[in-house]
Amino acid sequence: MEYILHIVIMLNIYILLVLSANLPVGLANLLSICQAAFYGIGAYFSAYFLMRFQLPFIAVALIVMTLTGLCSLVVSFAPVKLKGDYFVLATLAFQMIVFTVLYNWTDVTRGPYGIPGIPSVKLFGIMSISGIYGYFILTAVLSGSVILLFRKLKFSPYGRVLTAIRSDELSVSALGRNPVHFKTWAFFISAGFSGLAGLIYASYISYIDPTSFTLDESIFILTALFIGGIGNVKGPVLGALFVVVTPEILRFVGLPDAVAANLRQIIYGLTLVLIMYLRPQGLWGKITLK
């Protein structure tokens, strides 16, 4: 039972990450490959505040989301003005810079040794969320709330402007809207919720190190997004479900761990190729990536 609950907790964390990636990628047409960088920044900020201060969960979450969002301004200040491949390269550079800092700034991040002993979060500063059952409830509530929030956001005036920017940015500019302003906010919100996922991950695992926030992790998040489908809420949730549950199913096939790990990568790659060829909009998507 605890094994199943652990899988559900990780699924809820990835739902947060994939939904966050869907905002700039699926709505604003910004192909970002630095989602794991924001995930890691949020995790390390969380470790600092959880280990140094006795703040309630809501306070820590707001601080971490704000700080991670502010870090996104470093990459979005100029890159959101870039187009296509140039923007992708800018986000790739940011991803590599963040990983290098986390790995080599040993005085702060402990580098490859990681940070152990991260305490659990506390609700209202009193009740500590400890154990797998507590995190199951917490992540289920958070993922459900974020799903509803992003659904509301998609159909809000802001979300409709982002969709319009994706379809025809010049027309949006002609109507008096500033696309750069809306793209910057999309990046800020996306980074903030990725930081929230980092908070949950750090406090749940109670240990973090840079290897959890690599370029491979960013590609993994994008893979889930493209498999599920971009531009709506159901697609990212389905994509997260696919990439989290698939390797667990392979565990019951009886294959050796080394073979199962390689087979998982083959399945992900083959699935992505087939979906891009047969159904470019994803399993539950409505639009295709430009």
Image: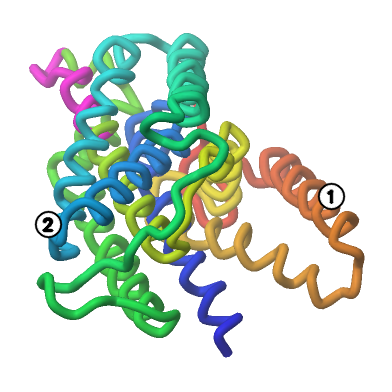
Q: Which residue is mark 2?
A: 59
Magenta span covers which residues?
A: 174-186
User: Tag 1, which secondary structure?
Assistant: helix
Say whether residue 184 is visible: yes
- Outermost residue, front direction? 107
Q: Residue at x 68, y 46 (%)?
A: 275
Choose between 210 and 5: the one closer to the eye: 210
Label number found at residue 262: 1
255 lies above or below 258: below
Give the mark nearest the N terminus, 1 or 2.
Answer: 2
Within the image, what quadrant is residue 247 found in? bottom right
For badge 2, the amino acid type reads Ala
Which residue occupies 78% across, 54% down? 264
Label 1 and label 2: CA atoms lie apart by 41 Å
Q: Amino acid at mark 1?
A: Asn
Do labels 1 and 2 touch, CB within 8 Å?
A: no
Determine if the magenta segment contains residue 181.
yes
User: Is residue 108 found left or right of 3 in the rendered image?
Assistant: left
Residue positioned most to the bottom:
1
**SS at badge 2:** helix
